[in-house]
Amino acid sequence: MTEQKFKGKKVLVTGAASGIGQAQAHAFLQAGAEVIGVDLQEITANFKTIVCDVSCPEKVAQLAAQVGKIDILLNTAGQLDDYRTMEDTNFSLWKKILATNLDSMFLMTSAFLPQMKQQKSGVIINMASVAGLVAGGGGIAYTASKHAIVGFTKQLALDEAQHGIQVAGIAPGAIDTPMNAKDFTENNGEMAKWVAEETPAKRWAKPEEVAELTLFLASPESSYLTGAVVPIDGGWTIR
């Protein structure tokens, strides 16, 4: 990517305080974009940041009014459920995971899609997961939420392509982020070792690798790619 590939573009990233969202924000900033990072917690960064609960309709409405027009929306905010089974998942946790992962995506897209349609251009990239393609990448709530995101992405792409809106999804596998820190610290990192061994590429990826894929998906070179959910999983889903 050339350094100023996205000069003149305004990008909003949710979940920008850490992990993939933070890497995406930095990647687009380096590529010349104006970046707005949104998270539930304070963000220390060299780009504009806003604290917002993106699962709250009123807060998202305020955010949209404050931010105004954007060119690229990266719906990256998400939360794990610690691989909890049905028996270990109460309704409160179920609602929390779906609110964070799925409701936020609906609300953010609802807030910014109208102005994208008005300008007849825009890119929306939703963060799915290998847990949205196969079982075993999370617990019952997380897996359900990520499967729903895959469906949301495909239907949104179908509905909005005629209006000049490009929609895509990313399905990461094992990415070394703070959200997965437990895998490296508990039980001498046995979970992290197991995941690497089970992944055909035999390693975890860095969030920057997902950010690079995001740059490509948001670029003019991939404008004919819409509705696809692209795995970046070291081969996890081809086993």
Image (cartoon, rainbow, N blue to C red):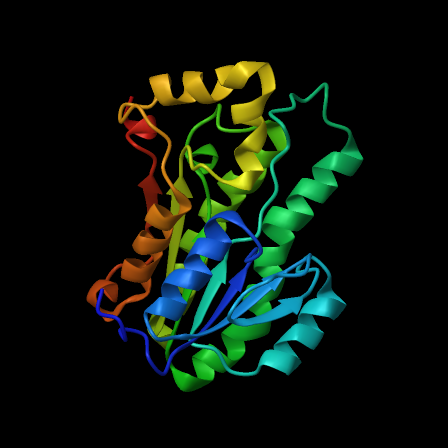
Q: Check the picture and name the quadrant holding the N terminus.
A: bottom left
User: Which picture quadrant has residue 158?
Assistant: bottom left
Q: Residue at x 33, y 40 (%)?
A: 232
Decide: is 237 above or below 45. Answer: above
Q: Position of residue 20 (x, y in %)?
A: 46, 49
Q: Position of residue 230 (x, y in %)?
A: 32, 46
Instruction: Return the residue nearer the eye: 18 or 140.
Output: 18
Q: Residue at x 43, y 37 (%)?
A: 175
Q: Can I make out residue 166 in this image? A: no
Q: Position of residue 89 (x, y in %)?
A: 72, 26
Q: Residue at x 41, y 34 (%)?
A: 133
Task: From the viewer's perspective, tell me whether residue 140 is left or right of residue 19.
Answer: right
Q: Position of residue 169 (x, y in %)?
A: 40, 51
Decide: is 221 above or below 134. Answer: below
Q: Residue at x 42, y 32 (%)?
A: 174
Decide: is 211 above or below 65. Answer: above
The mark total stands at: 0
Q: Can I make out residue 65 in this image? A: yes
